[in-house]
Image (cartoon, rainbow, N blue to C red):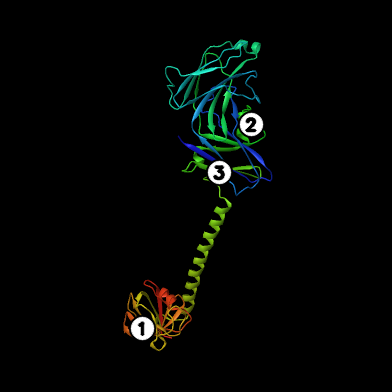
Amino acid sequence: MDNYKIFIVNKTSSKKQFWAFLSEPEDTFSTDLYLNSSAYITIKPDNTSQLNSFTIPLQYSTEAGCSNNAVGLNTVIESSITEKVDLTDGLTATFTISNEHLGPDLSSPASGSTDPGKVKVIVDPFAQNDEDKYSWYPSLTFGVQSQQGFMGYSWSPEPGETYKIKPKVKFYIATGSWESNQLLDMSSISTDSGEVTEDDFDAKLECTVTLENGEWTVTKGRPLTVNDQLIQMIESHNYLSKSHAQLTSLIAEASLITDLTVEDKEKSRSDGVEYPIKPKKQDKALSQDVASPFIYGRIALSSAIGFGFTYMFASGTKFKLVKRNSGTDFTFEYDGNKAAEQVRELLKAGAALIFTKD
């Protein structure tokens, strides 16, 4: 059984009651169909630290009731018997109109609905003309039971009538101060509410309805909490920081070679350096983890370069070439303020290198 979840976000300036309604069915089977809901939640304004939602399992039910109030606008309907139904199921409703004020009965007929996707409700004949005499009025209700309450529609049944109900996966979210199970006009609710259709849910069957400045918006998925927004900001900041570092490195490389002619420079890539990069012999006691003006090492290139080059640059850092072992093998020296570990990282395999003559 599918469970649909509708998250509610209140971006107004005041606390509001949000009600959930099941939409009208595919086919109008009664002229006096009213929305009926007891599903509501009260939400404070702009409360982004808490998630509020309606959880709606698509387990349909048919209800029958009798009361002293006729089915009509603003009437509160309370059913006395409920039966869970699946699409293609069928039920028979039996009403007794008398001074005994007997409750109705729902039973399963010999066969269900012959129409796919529909629930069939057969109403046995009853003394409809005696309803006013005994102040005993029957009602039928169809809908779903959510974790927050019932949502569906009610109508006054006709004796001997057969109703074929084809529900939609469609909901209305509205604000108001109604009573639970108070019958409401379907057209007025549908025109002043957030409308949620099956296409509005994501793969997890979740969506978000937001009320802001009198406007309803519906988006797929659940809303972001304060913690979610903070995590997104941190991730975005980290991404921007990395991008900025890469851009700075590229600008530094470009500025070093702007004034050089093609003959003055060549490019290659590192195929790796000889490990470890060591301080010069006269400074063996110096730690490899601190900056040293005496760091040197040997680097292999992915492609050969010509003769006469004196310096090598990696990400804007300058190295002196002290010995050409071959066109792809050089001994270098570094006298900057970077530690040995930083130098290893700069010259790792794949690093872009630029060679200059002065």
Contact, mark 1 vs mark 3 (Cβ under 8 Å): no
Report x, y in % for residue 186.
Answer: 60, 29
58 relative position to 194: left or right: left
Question: Dot 3: within a 10 Å radius of its alpha carbon, few (fewer than 14), some, or many (20 or more) residues?
Answer: many
Q: Secondary structure at mark 3?
A: strand
Marks 1/2: CA distance? 83 Å
**Nearer the N terminus, badge 1 or badge 3?**
3
Residue at the spot of label 1: 331
Q: Amino acid at mark 1?
A: Thr
Q: Which residue: 54% across, 60% down?
A: 234
Residue at the spot of label 2: 188
Marks 1/3: CA distance? 63 Å
Discs 1/2, front:
1
Q: Amino acid at mark 2?
A: Ser
Question: Camera-side residue: 224 or 199?
Answer: 224
Question: Camera-side residue: 81 or 170?
Answer: 81
Q: Quadrant of residue 276?
A: bottom left
The quarter of the image holding the C terminus is bottom left
Check residue 300 in the rendering and tell me which mark sits there, or answer none.
none
Check residue 208 in the rendering and tell me which mark sits there, or answer none.
3
Outermost front residue? 285
Q: How many marks?
A: 3
Q: Which residue: 64% across, 12% down?
A: 134
Q: Amino acid at mark 3?
A: Thr
